[in-house]
Each structure stands twice: as structure tokens, then as C-alpha cells.
Amino acid sequence: MKYMLLIYNNPATYQSWTEAARDELFGEVDALMKELTESGELVGGEALADASTATTVRVRGGVTAATDGPFAEAKEQLAGYLTIDCESQQRAVEIAARWPDARYFAMEVRPVMNTAGTEI
Amino acid sequence: MRQLAPQVLGTLVRRYGNFELSEDAVQEALLAAAVQWPASGLPDNPRGWLITVASRRLLDQLRAESARRRREVTAAALEPGGDLAAPSPGGEPGGQRDDTLTLLLLCCHPALSPPSQVALTLRAVGGLTTAQIARAFLVPEPTMAQRISRAKQRIKATAEPFRRPAEPERTQRLRVVLDVLYLIFNEGYTATSGPDLHRVQLTTEAIRLAREVHRMLPDDGEVAGLLALMLLTDARRPARTRPDGALIPLAEQDRSRWDSGAIADGVRLITAAMARAPLGPFQLQAAIAAVHAEATRAEDTDWPQIAALYKVLAGISPGPVVTLNRAVAVAMADGPQAGLDLLATLDADERMTGHHRLDAVRAHLLEMAGQPAAAQAAYRRAALRTTSLPERRYLESRAARLRP
């Protein structure tokens, strides 16, 4: 089963940290990525630029309105994601719990839809 | 050419005793053959050609490794016997067959997770490339390569000798092989359209491997049952989806599009197996598929017989999925309320909590029972819970069709 792990955090918090503390956090991420690559569970993932660089697009009555800023206004923003292919939701939750942002903010685990289907 | 893969690999492992490197060498030889044979023509002895090329690659690898370890290993010690260049044509047929089964048992080692068993079986026994397997499972090639190499390391760590395990272990391990082949089959069968097209190859591959195992073990009822089940299920594939990938339920399929040749094969296999072998879950599922296949129209289906077969299946191999399918058969044979009563026994089952299939079946039975409001609610709950796009589409359209 494929799962997307959505990473939520508040960049202001990390900005207030010392360089060493931030390096340690990145080190943790690198180690976990390496482990997931070696286990053959990592499918992909990207980090996103800060939410302040986002443009939200709406079309109403055929008119496009593009506004600066993210769709959901909150202190915690979607900072990136990783896609994994693992055996169970339980395993996906286990991986999410080891991602450092889970300790300070939150990770959201969502199953990815597939195109396989069984008729009744 | 891919049929030769397990025979060539078996010969190499037997000679050099290194499964991990032998498997890489065979894969390289197969790639070389794919490039050279179309240009230069098929060699007189394709199997001998592959063994020669794969052996050379393996010896190069072993030499490089021993050099790395700075160990004094003379090339002579690694030189294979004189039969390298010319294996006797058509020789050791028994040995070839043994190797395929031994390899299957090794690739489906219980120490591996099911996805690893599947990947390694397709590569080492099926002869598919890592790229093909990755495409079929919709993951990037490096992810699949990593999975395969990890599986091989784990097999190396078990240090299992390259021979068939003794009874009763052999029978238990063979069950795992059958489960892995069925898993491969279903990965391909449940594919619908578009991006899934590469997956259909998995169905063909699973049937090919099941046929191979059946040829080696013709008296094993469960092997015959699995092959029959695959043939009878796959026979419905042309009728189970619309061109856009939408699912068509069994009751609404155009049965003239079912593959009558595959049905005849499957029915013959399962009839013969059930007449002489002890019953098993694959045989019973094949028997159920055969009853469906023998009904020219959906309304001609012998539901009492299917319900009886499910009862036996629930006795020897109980589980929530069997109960779920049995509830449909019971509803068709004895009325929707009987089916709903059976479904109610699953409500307390933790394995089914939040599972969309329980709601999907309940929705169908409620619709049959003339309770459109409850049916609609159940279809919608199921649609929210499924992770399959075609199933969600189907469930939403069933919900929309109802007028409570």
C-alpha cells in the first residue's frame, strides 16, 4: 500500500533554533531517508518552499482569481511530503512517528488511491 | 527465453553456490540475449549459451571480489568443469524441473516479506527485469532494485542450502509459493486500464508459473486448484471493465465475452483434482468460480451450490473475507435477510473494522432487501473508505442510482 506522509510545521520555530540544533534535525531526516531507501519503501518526496511563496487559485463564474498565500491559513503549514510503499498503515504511522516534525508539530498519514479494483 | 531463466540460475547456483551473484549474472545474460539474439539469430543451444555467458559474468564477479579481499584465489579453482561450453542438448530434464521448484521455494522463503517474495520470484524465476517489475508495481526502479537486493541479502543470511526442503517443511513452504503466485495474479487481475496496463503482464506470468508448478507436481490438488482458479478468474477479464476502466459487476457482465477456452481448461483441471486429491481452499475457490462460469446467464447461477461450497470453505479455511463472500451467496440462495444476518457476525470482527468491503456487501444486500435509504448510506460509507478509484466510482454510482 502506498501512503503519503504530509509534513506540517511552523518554520518560525525552527528559525529560532541554534545552528547545531537545526543540523541535528537535518541529520535525523537524512538518516531516516537513507533507511527508507535501503528498505525499498521510499517512493518519492519533496520539500516545499515556504507557504508565503504560495499562490492560491480560484475560478468563479469563469473568472480566475490568484491570491498570494496558502489555501489554509494557519501557523502550521504543509512543508513537504514523502510517499512510501509499505506493508500496513501501522508501519506508515511508525515511520511518521520517527520523522522529527512529529515531535514538534504533526505528520498526517493518508493512503494513496490506486486504480486496481475488484468487481462484486 | 524467460522460461530458461530458472534452469540457468539453478545450474549456476549448483555449480558456484552463490545465489546472490548468480542471480545478477543470469539477469545480465538475459539482457545480453535480448540484445544479441534478435540480431545474430537464436543460438543452437539457447540454454547452453545463457549458462556460458552467465558463468563468465559470475566468474568475473567472483574474481573481482576475491581481488578486493586481497585473498589468494587462483583462477583455476574457480574454473568450472568441462561441461561449461556445451551442456548436453536436452540433457538433465529432471534436474531442470527440480531447479525451478527449488528456486521458487527459495524465493518464497518465509523470512521474506510478501512484497519481497513477489519481487524476487518475478526476477529470479520469472526472468523479468527490475525495470519491468517496478513498472508493474508502479514504483520507481531504484525502489524495486533496493527491495530485490535486500531480499537476496536476507536469503544469503539464512544460509539455506540449495536443495528442496524435506517434509513436512516442503509442503508448508509450497503453500507459501502458491500464496505468492496468487498474489502476483491478483496484482495483475485487479488492474483496470490506462496506467495499470503493465500490470496485466503479471496475470500471464502467474499463470505461466502455476502451470510450471502443476507440471512438476501433477498430483497436488491445491496446485491444480490454484491454476484452475486463475484460469477461471482470468477468463472473465475481457468482460469485467468498460473501456474507460469502470468496473462491471459479475451480474451485469456480457458473458459471451468470457474466454470459453480458459473456462474449459479450468473446469477440467478442478474436476480432475477434486476427484482424487484432499480438498483445499484453492480447489474450493476454483469450484465456486467454475459454478459461476457454467451459468450462461447471471440468473441461471446455481447459488445453493455456491453457498454450500462456501460453507465447506468456511469450515476448512475460516476468515472474514470468506464470510463476506459467503454472505452474498447465502443472500442469493436463501434471501437477503439470511445474508445480512451472516454479515452481522462480522461487526465485532476487528479485522473488518472500517473496511469498505463490509459496507459495500451490506449495501448490496440492503438494496436487495428493498431498503434503499439504508443501502444508499452503506454505499456512501464504503465509497469514502475505499482506496480504489474504480471501486469508489462504482459505489458512488450505485448510491446515486437509488431513490429512497
Image (spheres, rainbow, N blue to C red):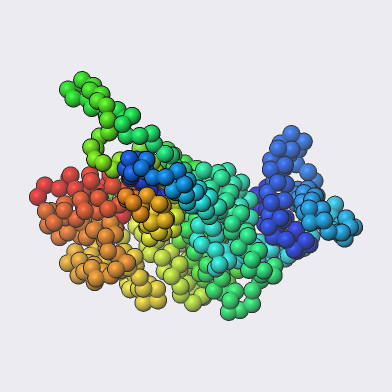
Residue placed most toward the observer, B401 or A17: A17
- Residue at (77, 49) in percent of width and height: B57
Q: Residue B335 occupies which quadrant of the picture?
A: bottom left
Across and down, in percent, residue B395 comes to 25, 49
Q: Residue B33 occupies which quadrant of the picture?
A: top right
- Residue at (69, 43) in percent of width and height: B31
Q: Horizontal placement of B270 versus A7: left or right?
A: right
* Count of numbered circles in the view: 0
In the displayed structure, A98 sits above or below B392; it is: below
Q: Residue B73 occupies which quadrant of the picture?
A: bottom right
- Furthest toward the bottom, the residue is B168
In the displayed structure, B62 sits above or below A67; it is: below
Across and down, in percent, residue B270 comes to 48, 66
- Furthest toward the left, the residue is B404
- Residue at (73, 61) in percent of width and height: B18
Across and down, in percent, residue A106 comes to 32, 50
Res B124 seen here: yes
- Residue at (69, 60) in percent of width and height: B19
Residue placed most toward the observer, B381 or B182: B381
Across and down, in percent, residue A117 comes to 36, 49
Q: Horizontal placement of B223 versus A85: left or right?
A: right
Residue placed most toward the observer, A48 or B134: A48
In the displayed structure, B199 sits above or below B355; it is: above
Res B48 seen here: no
